[in-house]
Image: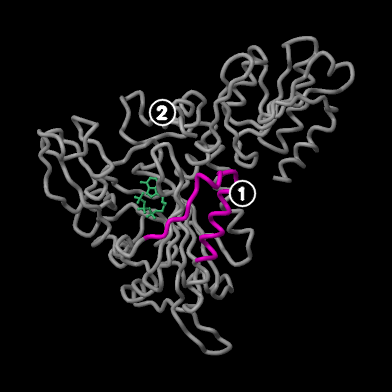
């Protein structure tokens, strides 16, 4: 872990088709990225694992709200007034820094120093910078046509509270979960997909009777921690850090971050906040709608409090990649391997004929066809088998099946394990059921 650098992750991602810098043929657009085939598969598996953790319970329902919402949503939520970071510019080197991050940043001319420390530095006063992207509805820009790209998915949930309550027949405690893109005009994006201006979030708002908020907050901090460790993140790389009173957002009466030890140091992976009744009350006041729960049996009515686990898909994907990355001395050099949890691995199994003749490709293809209806599988017949193993190790494929001359004689093949490098001879006919079982067991 110690010698893992972000550069190694970036280069593996590019080399193996996980993530590419965006608009590359036009010289690139800073801090925007495109996910390639394996990146899409990995990211989709991360999102699916999150959905499973949410919808596997019977007290959470799903939502997919619009990215463009009524501008008053963002006034009521406090984003138009308050969603800003203090920003400092250097008149000399033209670099821009977040005023609250200066301690950990490097001067634009002398990276060994902090901004302001070099003799030539000429920093402006800190200015507030609103992080929301603006656009306009309709073909002409006119007053009243300004809308924002949502900077978080959460508000889409609050404004649908009444709709969901009516159809879902749920009563607090219950949650609404959503996954989708969010946009923030970050002042200092960077560190690969850790901080970008367009990113995906996985957020769940859990509505509870006010008296139960503390207990549910603890519950969700523990649940979310366990989700990451169950999917392979090592406990020594993940901590819960409670926010101090001076760090709390305007809406929060308690927040804990899950911090991951990225190659750039400990940084926020997910935030779990006790938002109290701030959001529902703010939208009720601004919209005139009653956003409360009424118990029809007892007549009791109250505004639920909200516990929010808010995770970033890209930051989670990056954490899983970093935690899985290993370099190992093997007989013929150093092997790079992604020890991804099999549930997250983009490809579960690769089928490789040892040679491209003697009927081996046909047997391999037949097995591949059976396997791919059950799990993400790959068929690869190009190059030496060693190189093909290397490639599968680097994309994190847990199992490889090699078909050789013996396969045609006795119907067996070699099953290679990514982590132990153990190779065992198994009956080809047993492989689909065996791997399906192994995947389900994890
Ligand atoms: P930070 O302090 O790093 O800016 P934040 O506290 O503003 O993050 P939240 O508003 O709590 O972040 O958003 C919830 C989650 O969304 C974060 O924990 C992170 O995983 C993800 N996220 C937020 N901003 C970005 C971004 N610019 N790029 C990628 N992911 C992000």
Q: Residue at x 45, y 73 (%)?
A: 305
Q: Which mark is residue 230?
A: 1
- What x and y, as percent, mark residue 159? 41, 67
Q: Residue at x 58, y 48 (%)?
A: 229
Q: Is residue 284 left or right of residue 389?
A: left
**Is 15 located above or below residue 279 in the figure?**
above
Q: Is residue 370 left or right of residue 377?
A: right
Q: Quadrant of residue 191?
A: top left
Label 2 element class: helix
**Is 142 located above or below residue 383 in the figure?**
below
Pick out the residue farthest to the top: 357
Judged by its main secondary structure, the magenta piece is: helix
Q: Residue at x 40, y 74 (%)?
A: 277
Which comes before the other along the chain, label 2 or label 1? 2
Q: Which mark is residue 130?
A: none
State how far apart marks 2 and 1 are (Cα).
27 Å
- What x and y, as percent, mark residue 128? 19, 54
Q: Quadrant of residue 391?
A: top right
Label 1 element class: helix
Camera-side residue: 224 or 439? 224
Camera-side residue: 82 or 29? 82
Camera-side residue: 301 or 142? 301
Q: Magenta stretch: residue 281 in it? A: no
* Within-10-Å neighbours for mark 2: few <14, some 14–19, many 20+: few
Q: Is residue 192 left or right of residue 436?
A: left
Magenta highlight range: 218-243
- What x and y, as percent, mark residue 197? 34, 43
Q: Is residue 136 left or right of residue 49?
A: left
- What x and y, as percent, mark residue 369? 74, 29
Pick out the residue farthest to the bottom: 298
Q: Which mark is residue 7?
A: 2
Q: Are circles 2 and 1 on residues that touch, CB within 8 Å?
A: no
């Amino acid at each position: 872990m110690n010698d893992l650098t972000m550069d190694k992750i970036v280069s593996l991602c590019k080399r193996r088709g996980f993530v590419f810098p965006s608009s590359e043929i036009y010289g690139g657009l800073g801090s925007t990225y495109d996910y390639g085939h394996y990146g899409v598969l990995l990211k989709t598996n991360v999102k699916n694992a999150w959905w499973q953790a949410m919808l596997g319970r019977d007290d959470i329902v799903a939502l997919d709200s619009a990215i463009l919402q009524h501008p008053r949503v963002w006034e009521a939520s406090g984003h138009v007034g308050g969603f800003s970071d203090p920003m400092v510019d250097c008149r000399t080197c033209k670099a821009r820094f977040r005023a609250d991050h200066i301690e950990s940043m490097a001067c634009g001319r002398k990276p060994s120093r902090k901004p302001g420390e070099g003799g030539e530095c000429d920093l402006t006063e800190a200015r507030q910078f609103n992080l929301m992207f603006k656009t306009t509805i309709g073909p002409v820009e006119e007053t009243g046509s300004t809308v924002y790209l949502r900077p978080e998915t959460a508000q889409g949930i609050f404004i649908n509270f009444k709709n969901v309550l009516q159809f879902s027949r749920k009563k607090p405690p219950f949650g609404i979960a959503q996954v989708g893109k969010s946009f923030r005009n970050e002042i200092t994006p960077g560190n690969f997909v850790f901080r970008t201006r367009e990113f995906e979030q996985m957020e769940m708002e859990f509505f509870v009777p006010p008296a139960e908020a503390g207990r549910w907050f603890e519950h969700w901090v523990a649940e979310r921690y366990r989700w990451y460790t169950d999917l392979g993140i090592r406990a020594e790389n993940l901590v819960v850090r409670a926010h101090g009173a001076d760090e709390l957002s305007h809406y929060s009466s308690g927040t804990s971050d899950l911090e991951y030890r990225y190659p750039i140091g400990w940084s926020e992976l997910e935030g779990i906040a006790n938002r109290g009744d701030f959001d529902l009350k703010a939208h009720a006041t601004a919209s005139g709608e009653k956003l409360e729960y009424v118990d029809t049996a007892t007549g009791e009515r109250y505004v639920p409090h909200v516990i929010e686990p808010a995770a970033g898909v890209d930051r989670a994907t990056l954490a899983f990649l970093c935690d899985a990355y290993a370099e190992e001395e093997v007989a013929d050099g150093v092997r790079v391997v992604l020890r991804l949890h099999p549930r997250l691995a983009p490809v579960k199994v690769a089928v490789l004929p040892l040679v491209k003749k003697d009927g081996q490709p046909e047997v391999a293809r037949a097995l591949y066809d059976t396997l791919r209806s059950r799990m993400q599988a790959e068929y690869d017949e190009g190059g030496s088998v060693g190189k093909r193993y290397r490639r599968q190790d680097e994309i994190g494929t847990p199992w490889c099946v090699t078909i050789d001359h013996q396969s045609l004689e006795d119907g067996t093949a070699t099953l290679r394990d990514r982590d132990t490098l153990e190779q065992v001879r198994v009956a080809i006919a047993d492989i689909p059921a065996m791997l399906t079982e192994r995947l389900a067991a994890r």
